[in-house]
Image (tube, rainbow, N blue to C red):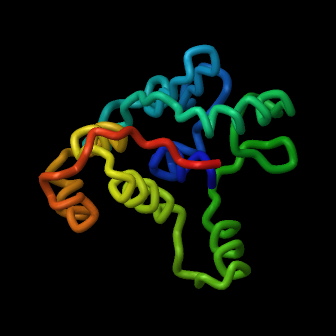
């Protein structure tokens, strides 16, 4: 959940996140603090998956997770095996939290976008971070852009 909240990445990208480079993996470069969201060997689509700088708050978690070790470098795993889908687990967690079963992992992307804009993030920077056009950002999240023209250029730094 933290990876989704901090990066605004689609859940398919999160499922391919790995500390190791390789085919089919979205690579987390711990040395440079970068998240190469487009899996190696994947053809680019309209759902852009551009490389982003990982916020320091998330880097602290990633360092701890990397230190714990993984079965094969995958960030999301269960019983030392890569997880193919988080839908059932996410649905169950949402239900236990009392926020309803119809909440999907995509809500993490929406939450990231909303928090960035509410924090005064520049709409061009936010759109770039989320790998979407400014037009799409305005269409979906325009009501969060401060005065639609008065947004500051403050970066997104969630508190942890």
Residue drawn where x is 65% and y is 48% of the image:
160
- Residue 118 position within the rendered picture, expressed as x and y whole percent measured from the top left: 36, 59
Residue drawn where x is 47% and y is 65% of the image:
107
Residue drawn where x is 69% and y is 38% of the image:
75
* Residue ranking furthest to the top: 31
Q: Quadrant of residue 125?
A: top left
Q: Quadrant of the N terminus?
A: bottom right
Residue drawn where x is 70% and y is 75% of the image:
92
- Residue 63 position within the rendered picture, expressed as x and y whole percent measured from the top left: 74, 29
**Above/below status of 12 relative to 75:** below
On the rendered structure, is 62 left or right of 26?
right
**Above/below status of 8 relative to 20:** below
- Residue 45 position within the rendered picture, expressed as x and y whole percent measured from the top left: 29, 39
**Above/below status of 103 relative to 56:** below
Nearer-the-camera pick, 102 or 118? 118
**Above/below status of 63 relative to 48:** above
On the rendered structure, is 71 left or right of 151?
right
Nearer-the-camera pick, 45 or 70? 70
Nearer-the-camera pick, 41 or 88? 88
Q: Quadrant of residue 93?
A: bottom right
- Residue 47 position within the rendered picture, expressed as x and y whole percent measured from the top left: 31, 44
Nearer-the-camera pick, 66 or 59? 59
């Amino acid at each position: 959940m933290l990876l989704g909240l901090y990066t605004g990445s689609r859940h398919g990208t999160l499922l391919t996140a790995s500390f190791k480079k390789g085919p089919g993996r979205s690579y987390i470069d711990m040395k440079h603090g970068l998240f190469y969201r487009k899996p190696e060997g994947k053809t680019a689509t309209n759902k852009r998956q551009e490389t982003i700088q990982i916020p320091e708050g998330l880097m602290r978690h990633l360092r701890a997770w990397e230190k714990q070790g993984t079965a094969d470098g995958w960030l999301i795993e269960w019983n030392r095996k890569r997880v193919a889908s988080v839908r059932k687990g996410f649905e169950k967690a949402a239900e236990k939290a009392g926020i309803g079963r119809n909440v999907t992992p995509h809500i993490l992307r929406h939450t990231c976008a909303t928090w960035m804009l509410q924090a005064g993030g520049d709409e061009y920077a936010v759109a770039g971070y989320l790998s979407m056009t400014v037009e799409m950002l305005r269409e979906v999240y325009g009501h969060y852009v401060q005065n639609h023209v008065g947004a500051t250029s403050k970066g997104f730094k969630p508190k942890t």
